[in-house]
Image (spheres, grey):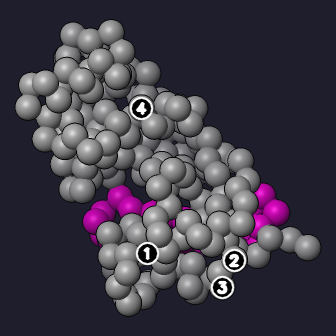
Amino acid sequence: MADRVGILAYGSLIDEPGPEIAPHITHRIACRTPFKVEFARTSRTREGGPTLVPYVEGSEVAAQILVVDLPPKEATDRLYRRERRKVGSNISYVPPREITPDRVVIETLRLFEGVETVLYTRIGANIEGLSAIRLAELAVASARVRQDGSAGISYLMNAKKREIQTPLSAEYEKEILRLTGAGSLDAALACTCAQR
C-alpha cells in the first residue's frame, strides 16, 4: 500500500520538524527536491541568516520526505504552524489570495516518490544582490547575535552535513572562512561567538 501523506524537507525541517510533526513521522524517504533551491532568503528568526527556498537559479538538492500518519489537512496545518513559528496555536492554513515574497504557501505534489500527497513550503527569495559574499556577510552577522545553533553559519553547517549543495554553497562557505579568518565553519562559528 502506498504511503498517503508526506512532508518534503530540504532545510532545517529535516532535523527540526517540531513537536506537532515529529511524533507523527512513521519513516523517511531519501529523495531530491523536484524544484531548484538556493540560500536566497534571510530569516527573521535566524537574525537575518540565509535559508534555503525555492529559487529558479538554484539546484535540485538532497531532501527527505517525512511520511506522517496524519490526514492531508492536519499535516498542512501543522506544517504551516511550524513555518510560521505558531506551534501549539489553533491557526489553520488558508491558501492566500495574493502571493507575496513573505507569504508562506503550502504546495502539494501528487504521487511523488511513491507518496500520494507530499506537502512542501514555498516562500519567496528576499536577498537583493544575491552572491556568496552577501550570504557570508549575513551569516556572520547573524552568528554574532544568535548563538543557540540557529544562526546562518549553523544553518549552512547542517545543510552541508546533509550533503545539500547549491550553486552558491561552496563559495558561500569560502567567503565565511575569509571574513572570519577561520579554517573551518566550526572555527568560524566559535570566532563569531567570541566577537559578540
Q: CA distance from mark 1 to mark 3?
A: 14 Å
Secondary structure at badge 2 equals: loop
Q: Nearer the viewer, mark 3 or mark 2?
A: 2
Q: Can the viewer see residue 40?
A: no
The amino acid on which the numbered mark 1 sits, given as a three-letter code, is Tyr
Q: CA distance from mark 3 to mark 2?
A: 7 Å
Q: CA distance from mark 1 to mark 2?
A: 17 Å
Residue 142 drawn above or below residue 13: above
Q: Earlier in the sequence, mark 4 or mark 3?
A: 3
On the image, numbered disc 1 is attached to which residue?
80
On the image, numbered disc 4 is attached to which residue?
157
Q: Earlier in the sequence, mark 4 or mark 2?
A: 2
Which residue shows up at 36% across the image and 46% down it?
51
75 to the left or right of 181: right
Q: Residue furthest left?
A: 196
On the image, numbered disc 2 is attached to which residue?
69
Residues at circles 4 and 3 in contact by the CB criterion of under 8 Å: no
On the image, numbered disc 3 is attached to which residue?
71
Q: Quadrant of residue 129?
A: top left
Residue 152 drawn above or below residue 55: above
The amino acid on which the numbered mark 2 sits, given as a three-letter code, is Asp
Q: Within 10 angstroms of label 3, few (less than 14), some, or many (20 or more) residues?
A: few
Range shown magenta = 99-124
Residue 174, position as x, y percentages in the image: 34, 16
